[in-house]
Image: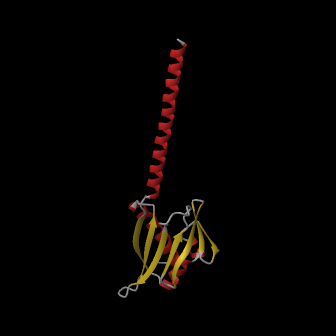
Amino acid sequence: MFANVLNIYNFAKTEFEYFIADGFKILEFCFLNLLNLINNMSKHKFIAEYELRASPKVLFPYISSASGMQQWFAEKVILKDSTTFDFLWDGESHVAKLSQLRLNKSAKFDFVPPNTEEKDHNYLEFKMDVSDLTGSTYLKIVDYSMNTDEDELTELWGDLIYKLKEIVGS
């Protein structure tokens, strides 16, 4: 009788060990797939163009300087050094490097990824062009990020540009 109980115990112990090992294998498989999914999530390039009735010379500080951008683009913008900006939205910090700057033409901000291994980082680009026909300035926005909701981005940028237009009198 004791031998039967011992055999049942050993069998149950072995099965339980296999069950635990299989459970860890399943967890590891799920975790690796989740990491792979996160790393391969595609970014979205949102492009929009807005007409403003203001010269590039007037608009340029609003797309390239901390004080100008703080008026319409973010809750707060802190200039950390000559090319590093800290944008605050909803109390959350987003650090970006001013990677391209053409006087009265364009500005590009490359956001510093929290994960240093990330190669495909977010960026934001502002480009101005003046229409020879109307004399209006067109501001082209390129927003490259994880946000893939086209309607949400259209509304967000529409609201931001509305604020900018009020400031510059457009």
Please give the name of the residue rendered at 52% of the width and 11% of the height, measured from the top-left corner: 1
Q: Say which of 151 and 5 sits in front.
A: 5
The residue drawn where x is 53% and y is 75% is 167
The residue lying furthest to the left in this view is: 133
**Colouring chosen for the image of the structure:** secondary structure
The furthest residue to the front: 3
The residue shown at (41%, 74%) is 50
Residue 126: x %, y % from top left: 47, 76
Q: Residue furthest right?
A: 80
Residue drawn 57% across the image and 76% down it:
68
- Residues 63 and 82: in front is 82
Q: Which residue reaches farthest top?
A: 1
Residue 23 image offset from top left, x and y in percent: 48, 37
Judging depth in this view, the residue of 90 and 123 nearest the camera is 123
Q: Is residue 21 above or below residue 45?
A: above
- Report the number of discs: 0
Q: Nearer the viewer, residue 152 or 117?
A: 117
The image position of residue 160, as x and y in percent, is 48, 68
Q: Is residue 5 above or below residue 110?
A: above
Please tell me whether residue 110 is drawn above or below residue 17 in the rendered image.
Answer: below
Image quadrant assignment for residue 133: bottom left
Image x and y of residue 40, in percent = 43, 58
